[in-house]
Image: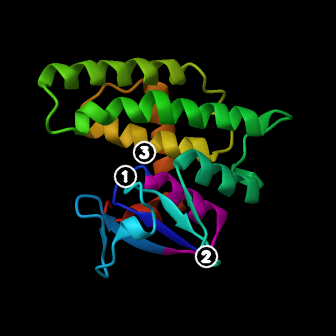
Amino acid sequence: MILYYSPGACSLADHIALEEAGRKFALAKVDLKTHKLEDGRSYLDINPKGYVPALQFDDGQVLTENIAILTFIADNYPGLMAPGQFGRYRLLEKLAFISTEIHKSFAPIFNPAATEEEKATAAGKVRKRLDEISTQLTGPYLFGEHATVADFYLFVMLLWAEKNKIEIPKSLKTLAEHIRARPTVEIALRQEGLA
C-alpha cells in the first residue's frame, strides 16, 4: 500500500490512522502546486483530482477521499470504529460533518486570492462548526474513551485552526492534546517533517 500525502494536509489523518492500525504502507510525498511526486512522476497519473489523500493498493487500485479511506481503515481495524450498533453510521456522520462543514470551510483561508473579509468570514464559520462538534464529545474523544479515525481527521482541522489563530473550544484543545500524545501521531508528524 502507498499513501500519497502532502505534509500537514488532510492526508495526515489517514497517515495517523494507518499507523494506529499497524498497517504496512509506504509514503509518497506530493507537491500540490506542481502535482509531482518526489521521483518526478506526475501525481495526476495516480489521482487525476490532483489533491491528497490517495491510497494505492498492491493490485494498483486507488482509493481517494478522506471519508472513503478512513472508513476503509476503520472497517479493517475495528479498534478505530465508533462503538455500538450504529457505530459505522455514526462514524460516517462525523466524517461527513468534518469534511463538508469544517474542512471545506477552510478553503478561503488557504486561498491567496481571497480577501481579508472572506478569510474572516471563513474563520468565523470554522469557529462555529468547532463549537458545534465540541458539544458532541462523549468522553476524551468524539465517541468516548477510544479514538476513532474521525478523531484523527478532527485533529488535523484543529492543527489548521491553531495555525490560523482560530479560537478552539477547550474540550477540543483537550482532545487535540490526547491525540498528540499518542506515539503513532508522533511518528506520523515526524515522518511528515512536522515535529
Mainly helix, strand or loop, the magenta region?
A: helix
Q: Does residue 175 show up?
A: yes
Looking at the image, is mark 3 or mark 1 earlier in the sequence? 1
Question: Badge 3: few (under 14), some or many (20 or more) residues near its Cα, within 10 Å?
Answer: some
At label 3, the amino acid type is: Val
Of the residues tagged 3 and 1, which is closer to the observer? 1
For disc 2, the marked residue is: 24
Q: Position of residue 40 (x, y in %)?
A: 28, 79
Q: Are marks 3 and 1 in contact (CB under 8 Å)?
A: yes
Residue in the image at 29% along x and 64% along y: 35
User: Which label number is shown at residue 153?
Assistant: none
Residue in the image at 33% along x and 60% along y: 7
For disc 3, the marked residue is: 156
- To which quarter of the image does residue 163 belong? top left
Residue in the image at 43% along x and 25% along y: 170
**Relative to residue 169, is residue 179 depicted above or below?**
below
Spatial distance from mark 2 to mark 1, Cα to Cα?
Answer: 21 Å
For disc 1, the marked residue is: 9
**Relative to residue 59, is residue 174 depicted above or below?**
above
Residue in the image at 21% along x and 26% along y: 119
Looking at the image, is mark 3 or mark 2 earlier in the sequence? 2
Q: Say whether residue 131 is magenta.
A: no
Q: Position of residue 16 (x, y in %)?
A: 52, 58
**Region in magenta:** 11-26
Q: Position of residue 18 (x, y in %)?
A: 58, 63
At label 2, the amino acid type is: Lys
Q: Say whether residue 21 is magenta.
A: yes
Question: Badge 1: few (under 14), some or many (20 or more) residues near its Cα, within 10 Å?
Answer: some
Q: Does residue 164 show up?
A: no
